Amino acid sequence: MQIPRNPLWGMNRENRVGCIKKTDEPFSSTINLDLLQAAEPIGTELDRLWNDERTKYNCFQYAVSGINRLPRESIPLIGGLDPRLGFDTGELQKTLFQMGLKWAHGIGQMKDHYLIAAVVDIGIESNSDYHFYRLDADGSWSHKFNNYRVSRLDARGNKILDPKSAVMDYRRTIINGFNSNKFYHDFAGFFYVPNEGLIK
């Protein structure tokens, strides 16, 4: 399979993190997303299904679950990336292509597909992490953290209208009662997922 080239592939982690200002200080105030989420209206019955099953699925499984967003046991996990060993954006992109996702060169439409977006917190030595967002039928972007409810809010409590401009600095954000300490500073791109979703 021909994998599209990305200009960041091959750049070492130290240089790339320097380019994206990994050392930026977090916001001075702490945002409690638990309180904001409790006040956020649940949009659909599908949200309720995911919230009932929230401990079983992570952000990637939520993003690639299919156009109808139904939780199901056959949703795959990302393979081959160990956050404890560290990975970068290029490695995540290659893995997504190998799993059958298609590169989207901006927000548009592809027949029988829908859009998701990926972001990365690149660890210098280890502890890298990824997070995913999906474009829903009403035009809003939603996501979920492990063991957490479906949300349409970013790290500052703003509605996500564009993942590229949403605030991804969760270092001063309380989620599930704990400080997340994640800063998804590298935007990995938009990807197309088949309407039926990914299947194991």
Image (tube, rainbow, N blue to C red):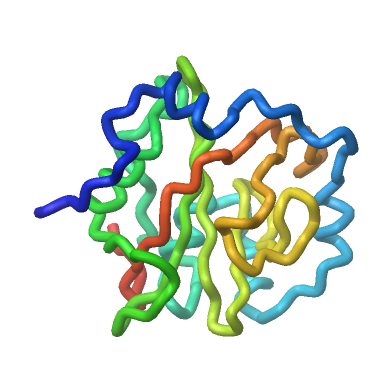
Residue 42 versus residue 2 in the image, above or below: below
The C terminus, quarter of image: bottom left
Residue 54 versus residue 135 in the image, above or below: above
Q: Is residue 49 left or right of residue 63?
A: right
Q: x, y (%) of residue 80? A: 30, 35
Q: Is residue 178 visible?
A: no
Q: x, y (%) of residue 24? A: 68, 28
> In which image quadrant can residue 193 be found?
bottom left
Q: x, y (%) of residue 21? A: 59, 30
Residue drawn at 34 percent across, 77 percent down: 113
Q: x, y (%) of residue 129? A: 51, 35
Q: Is residue 85 left or right of residue 164?
A: left
Residue that extends furthest to the left in the rendered view of this protein = 1
Q: Nearer the viewer, residue 22 or 198?
A: 22
Residue drawn at 65 percent across, 56 percent down: 166
Q: Is residue 31 visible?
A: yes
Residue drawn at 33 percent across, 28 percent down: 11
> In which image quadrant can residue 105 be found?
bottom left
Q: Nearer the viewer, residue 60 or 109?
A: 109
Q: Is residue 48 left or right of residue 131?
A: right
The N terminus, quarter of image: bottom left
Image mark count: 0
